[in-house]
Image (cartoon, grey):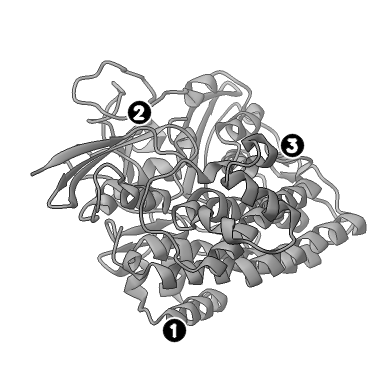
Amino acid sequence: MSRTVTIDPITRIEGHLAIRIKIDSSRVVKAFSSGEMFRGFEVILKGRDPMDAQQITQRICGVCPVSHGTASILAQDAAYGATPPKNGRLIRNLILGANYIQSHILHFYHLAALDFVDITAITKYKGRDPVLRDLKKWVKGQISSNVIYPAAPFLPRYSGKYIQNTGLNILAIKHYLDALDMRTLAHKAGAVFGGKLPHAATLVPGGVTEKVTAVKIAAYASMISKLQTFIDKSYLTDVGEVAAAFPEYFRIGKGCGNFLAYGVFPESANNSEKLLPSGVVVGGRLRSFDAARITEDVRYSFYSSSSGLHPVQGQTVPAPHKNGAYSWLKAPRYNGTVVEVGPLARIMVAYLKGENRAVKKLVNGLLAKLGRKPKDLLSVLGRHAARAIECKVVADRCAEWVEQLVPGEPTFQDFTIPKTGRGVGLTEAPRGALGHWLEIDDHKIKRYQCVVPTTWNCSPRDDNGNPGAVEQALARTPIANSKNPIEATRVVRSFDPCIACAVH
């Protein structure tokens, strides 16, 4: 007997996402992903000075503002013909890299790990750590919940299978608390050159406004070193432990199996070389990326604008009462194909290209340790593993980039805003491929369009009825108890959705 279950909202993600699943014979047979609000950033930007864009678009999201700021200044670089000097390029990478690290740590420990860790195991804790002792009292109801707020997201929760090993649970809870400090440290590292985080103040077309000093280099390097230690000794290890405890999640949440990456962290002045390269994987084959093949369908979206438009012609015309629509997200497609974006997409593209030896070595090492094959990465646990691997790759490279800075050398190239112009900024947010398309007329913004990672992943069906990446990943997911559909939430959270970005 089939049953429809609605999870509204999905908690522990950014923004308001509703998932509706149809369950038959204890498996999901159909899924619908719905973004539930409209914000209108693209409308707000019309008629403004182009230099407002990198600050306004950073307010799309407090978790990944640097990515939006980066995409905006890349679009303006193209429109103005500005090329950042080496220091400017490196500092952009360092700010974005720090934002990646905090975002990945946040996602695993504070948003996703709670689906696997048993908080009640803390009642058996016998150590002397004062925080863990207070947490034990809180779980047992002996002290008020406001005494140790960071633990509150663990409860209430769905009933289901959690890690069985008491010691491993307690260690994971300890790392959960440690990760709060690590995320703060990553924010501080980004603020060394970003001025502040969230919402970096120093990102501008032509480079950055911050100067390079020996003191700033030393401060950033020290913080990154501590983050590297946490990633190596805690993050990677904990992901491996979860994978060992829940091997079935290497078979759950495969999704469409197609991947898209724009590439990120330029290693050269002309952006021809990147730490994580661009590419498209369709049907297991790696292909070159072509931005002209991006379109957005709106048949099932609350917009009255034309469907199938490239972002250069993109429109943002809300239609909240549109018949047949069920989401405020559009449906981006690449050459008409559903693709997944994010850490797994970037790692798959980099792994298949084989140019980044660190990625190849880390992926092969993890797969060997877990007794898995590359195809097993197309799963819930594969997404978590890819995110952890990427976090290490980025942190290790940040430690090298900061040493390449030269105090006193320029960080910015001057420019003139043209009367008319166009530019596109393609980069990668922690959650996936991010593009900003800018058109200028009479020195003002005429058109601004954003296609963001979660729009790709959590999109509704397209004009041909093809489900989006998350909708496909939910299909065939086993649901042990329809009243406690924890399996479905684990699939969705493995994508690290940000609906605040997607409904910009």
View extreme (top): residue: 321
Residue type marked 3: Ala
Q: Which residue is mark 3?
A: 201
Q: Which mark is residue 328?
A: 2
**Measured from the top left, where is residue 420 in percent x and y?**
55, 28
Closer to us: mark 3 or mark 1? Answer: 1
Quarter of the image where the N terminus is located: top left
Residue type marked 2: Trp
Is 35 above or below relative to 226? above
Q: Earlier in the sequence, mark 2 or mark 3?
A: 3
Closer to us: mark 1 or mark 2? Answer: 1
Check contact, mark 3 vs mark 1: CB within 8 A. no
Q: Which mark is residue 368?
A: 1
**Measured from the top left, where is residue 100 in percent x and y?**
60, 54
Closer to us: mark 2 or mark 3? Answer: 2
Disc 3 is placed on an element classified as loop
Foreground residue among 407 and 162: 162
Is 107 above or below relative to 252? above
Disc 1 is placed on an element classified as helix
Disc 2 is placed on an element classified as loop
Q: Mark 1 Cα within 10 Å, few/some/many (few <14, many 20+)? A: few
**Disc 1 to disc 2, C-alpha distance:** 42 Å
Residue at image coords 18%, 53%: 27
Q: Report the side of 393 relative to 383 (left or right).
A: right
Residue at image coords 42%, 66%: 349
Q: Report the side of 89 relative to 221 (left or right).
A: left
Q: Is residue 169 visible?
A: yes
Q: Which mark is residue 195?
A: none
**Measured from the top left, where is residue 455 in percent x and y?**
39, 40
Check contact, mark 2 vs mark 3: CB within 8 A. no
Q: Report the side of 458 relative to 404 (left or right).
A: left
